[in-house]
Image (cartoon, grey):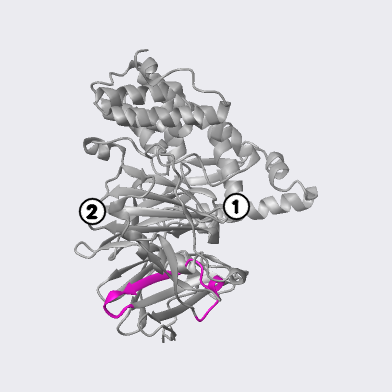
């Protein structure tokens, strides 16, 4: 029988408390709230046995008893991978992934709602729909709510990526917008084998992110990151290795109410203590860039909310009213659109024959051309929701035509900025960094034909930034130098010119420890790739 467990801080071992009324695998990635005043645990939703749940369960620790609470409304649809947080007597639940029927095979998708559950009245209410800033969005288990400002912070991630990331986001209880609020945190998402959560540490006054991953040897790797609170647009995120005594009090809450139903004892083995494996090595901080509040606004990722097409990071399209219509693009329509759009910018467009060769090679000519015609009509219909954009075949090649003053495309802006007539100026470089730091080009999409575009854009970004760094005065503009080096290393982690620029700038600022951490990370990556040590020391490159 599966068990609820208590974590003993003294022995750092698990102790069985009680057995739940349901099998463990029925409620993976549920949301939770522990009400301290009456020692009651509430469980919302979850996933298991190919079904999403919308159950509300309550466990009374004093009575050692489970109850299933029946709500009269139908607002809380079956889901998992939502974020939840508490404000007064109300539990707020944001988004998630599931289906209206609860069946995994029947039209599952992401939810874009913020619902509230009243503990006192056992009742759900819909607060509002929100605008997801990324495609296929899911959330870490908890949100941190600031009741004074009616704001909240969550960690979001793309659900269909294994080697993905967590992105800190800020929202308001009275507004549908979610905005990015910091750098990305690496996250290996392997569905029920992984877990992530977010807390606010009341002693250090920092946000604390915990990620867990069950390994093949049946151990759990735990990573802890701290984020300054409230976070800025470019937040220093620090990875903590080993046990941090200031954070220890978080683990009982984390494991007791989340991990207890996430990775507990196997039936055939009975009650067993879980082992948490802490990585002994300290990786480089995700962002060594500190003391940059004066430059934060310069690099904040701001783009128009209407007539916008985004390729850097996750693929997104916003129509003329600012609504996100990305979900209307099926995988096929998305690839068709990208084929036409990217070849239009790079060249004269793309022929119907080449499109068919890529998308419908298995069809006979008549069927393939019919498929192309039908999907071109669908694509034109979707693009009609934006102003000043059309598909044309007047030259014999399919081509997208748009007014760059009306339609914003970060890829086009990136190319235009990099190819600025003559030497790009400081404003051009800041614009290029601002766009490039959002993420790799169409990072969640993978097509054979797309590799060429990805490599070309990466080379353009790297070459443009390195050329500018060769003639800039880093002592006069250290913040820009650090952002420039950081961006280059995002696209080429073994770029020697970028690591030299970063280490020299940090050293000149007196941040010798950060310079050493950056260089150590670089040398580890170098050895992992080439299986030989990096031939220079930090002192040698600084004196170069």
- Identify which residue, 75 or 48, lies in the foreground: 48
In the rendered view, does 332 fall on the left or right side of 365? left
Confirm whether the magenta stretch covers residue 227. no
| CB atoms of marks 1 and 2 within 8 Å | no
Where does label 1 land, which residue? 333
> Residue 451: percent from the left, percent from the top?
60, 36
Q: Which quadrant is home to the N terminus?
A: bottom right
Label number found at residue 79: none
The magenta stretch is 21-39
- C-alpha distance separating marks 1 and 2: 46 Å
Looking at the image, the residue that sits furthest to the top is 544
* Residue 359 image offset from top left, x and y in percent: 69, 47
- Local packing at callout 2 (Cα closer than 10 Å; few below 14, some 14-19, many 20+) is few
Give the total number of marks visible in the rendering: 2
| Quadrant of the image containing the C terminus | top left
**In the figure, residue 190 lies in which quadrant?**
bottom right
- The circle drawn on residue 205 is 2
Question: Could you tell me which secondary element the residue under label 1 belongs to?
Answer: helix
């Amino acid at each position: 029988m599966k068990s609820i467990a208590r974590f003993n801080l003294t022995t750092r071992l698990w102790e069985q408390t009680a057995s739940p009324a349901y099998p463990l695998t029925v409620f993976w990635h549920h949301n939770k709230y522990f009400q301290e005043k009456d020692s009651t645990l509430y469980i919302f939703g979850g996933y298991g046995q190919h079904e999403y749940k919308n159950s509300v369960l309550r466990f009374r620790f004093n009575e050692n008893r489970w109850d299933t609470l029946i709500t009269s409304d139908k607002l809380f649809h079956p889901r998992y991978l939502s974020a939840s947080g508490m404000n007064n007597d109300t539990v707020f639940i944001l988004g998630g992934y599931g289906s209206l029927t609860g069946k995994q095979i029947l039209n599952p998708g992401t939810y874009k709602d913020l619902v509230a559950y009243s503990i006192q009245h056992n009742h759900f209410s819909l607060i509002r729909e929100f605008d997801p800033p990324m495609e296929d969005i899911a959330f870490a288990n908890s949100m941190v709510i600031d009741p004074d400002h009616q704001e909240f912070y969550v960690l979001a991630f793309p659900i269909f990526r294994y080697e993905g990331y967590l992105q800190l986001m800020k929202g308001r209880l009275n507004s549908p917008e979610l905005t990015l609020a910091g750098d990305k945190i690496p996250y290996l998402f392997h569905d029920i084998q992984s877990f992530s959560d977010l807390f606010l540490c009341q002693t250090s006054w920092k946000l604390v992110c915990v990620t867990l991953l069950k390994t093949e040897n049946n151990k759990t790797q735990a990573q802890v990151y701290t984020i300054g609170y409230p976070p800025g647009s470019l937040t220093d995120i620090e990875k903590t290795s080993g046990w941090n005594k200031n954070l220890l009090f978080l683990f009982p809450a984390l494991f007791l109410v989340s991990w207890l139903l996430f990775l507990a004892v196997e039936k055939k083995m009975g009650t067993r203590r879980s082992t948490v494996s802490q990585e002994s090595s300290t990786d480089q901080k995700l962002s060594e860039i500190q003391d940059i509040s004066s430059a934060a606004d310069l690099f904040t990722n701001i783009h128009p909310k209407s007539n916008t097409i985004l390729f850097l990071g996750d693929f997104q399209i916003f129509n003329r009213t600012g609504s996100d219509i990305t979900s209307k693009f099926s995988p096929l329509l998305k690839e068709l659109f990208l084929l036409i759009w990217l070849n239009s910018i790079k060249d004269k467009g793309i022929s119907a024959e080449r499109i068919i060769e890529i998308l419908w090679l298995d069809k006979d000519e008549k069927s393939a051309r019919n498929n192309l015609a039908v999907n071109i009509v669908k694509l034109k219909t979707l693009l009609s929701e934006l102003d000043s954009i059309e598909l044309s075949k007047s030259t014999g090649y399919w081509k997208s035509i748009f007014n760059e003053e009306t339609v914003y495309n970060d890829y086009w802006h990136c190319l235009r900025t990099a190819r600025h007539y003559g030497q790009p100026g400081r404003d051009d470089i800041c614009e290029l960094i601002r766009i490039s730091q959002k993420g790799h080009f169409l990072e969640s999409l993978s097509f054979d034909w797309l590799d060429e575009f990805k490599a070309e854009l990466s080379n353009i970004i790297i070459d443009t930034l390195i050329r500018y760094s060769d003639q800039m005065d880093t002592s006069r503009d250290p913040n820009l130098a650090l952002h420039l080096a950081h961006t280059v290393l995002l696209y080429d982690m073994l770029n020697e010119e970028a690591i030299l620029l970063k280490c020299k700038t940090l050293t000149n600022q007196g941040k010798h420890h950060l310079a050493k951490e950056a260089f150590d990370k670089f040398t580890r990556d170098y050895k992992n790739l080439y299986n030989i040590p990096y031939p220079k020391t930090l002192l040698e490159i600084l004196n170069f």
